Image (tube, rainbow, N blue to C red):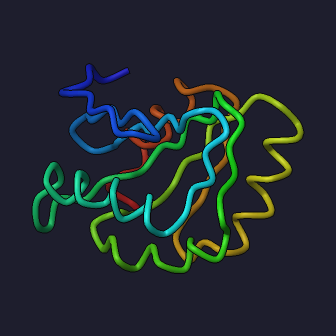
Amino acid sequence: MTQSLKTINLSFCKLTFANNYVISEINQGVVLTKELFNEAGSVLFDHFKENQKYVHIAYRRSDYNVNPVDYINCSDYPNMLAVAIVTNTEAKRSTANFEKAFFPKPYEIFNTLEDAVSWVENNIQNL
C-alpha cells in the first residue's frame, strides 16, 4: 500500500490521503448527508488541486448511513474518478450494491483495503 501523506480528522470521519486516492472512515452512527459531503469536499478540494485525479476509497469499518440521493451530487467533485467501497459483511455489501445504482461514476466493492488500493493503483490511468 502506498504510504499516506497526511490524515485529517473531521467531526464525523477520518480522511487519509495518498497521491491518487483518499481513504475515508466514517464514524459509528453517522448519517452521511449532503452537508457532511460538502464539509469533506472542502478538504478534498484543498488536497487534490485542480486537474489532480483521485479515487475515493470508503473504508466501511463502522455502521453508518448514507443518503443515496446525495450520490447524485458527486458531479461536484470532477477530479474524483471513481469510488471503491471496502466492506467485509454481507449486510454492508448489500447496502453498497444498492447505493451503486445512484452513483454515476465507476463504483467497485472490495473485501479488503489492500484489494481496493491495489485496484486504484492498477486502474487509475484507465478510469
**Image quarter of the C terminus:** bottom left
Q: Can you give x and y, in whole percent of width and height, for residue 34 in the image?
A: 49, 69
Front one among 30 and 103: 30
User: In which quadrant of the rendered view does residue 64 lie?
Assistant: top right
Q: Residue at x 43, y 50 (%)?
A: 56
Is residue 59 shown above or below 67? above
Tell me what residue is drawn at x 25 percent, y 54 percent.
44
Q: Position of residue 111 (x, y in %)?
A: 70, 30
Residue 2 on image: x %, y %:
30, 24
Residue name at image x 39 percent, y 52 percent: 55
Identify the image quadrant of residue 33.
Answer: bottom right
The image shows residue 66 at horizontal and vertical percentages of 65, 58
Q: Residue at x 26, y 28 (%)?
A: 7
Q: With 26 as the anchor, is 6 left or right in this view?
A: left
Q: Judge by depth and name the residue closer to the eye, 13 or 54.
A: 13
Could you tell whether 92 is left or right of 6 in the image? right
Give the quadrant of the N terminus. Answer: top left
Tag count: 0
Residue 100 position (above or below residue 73): above
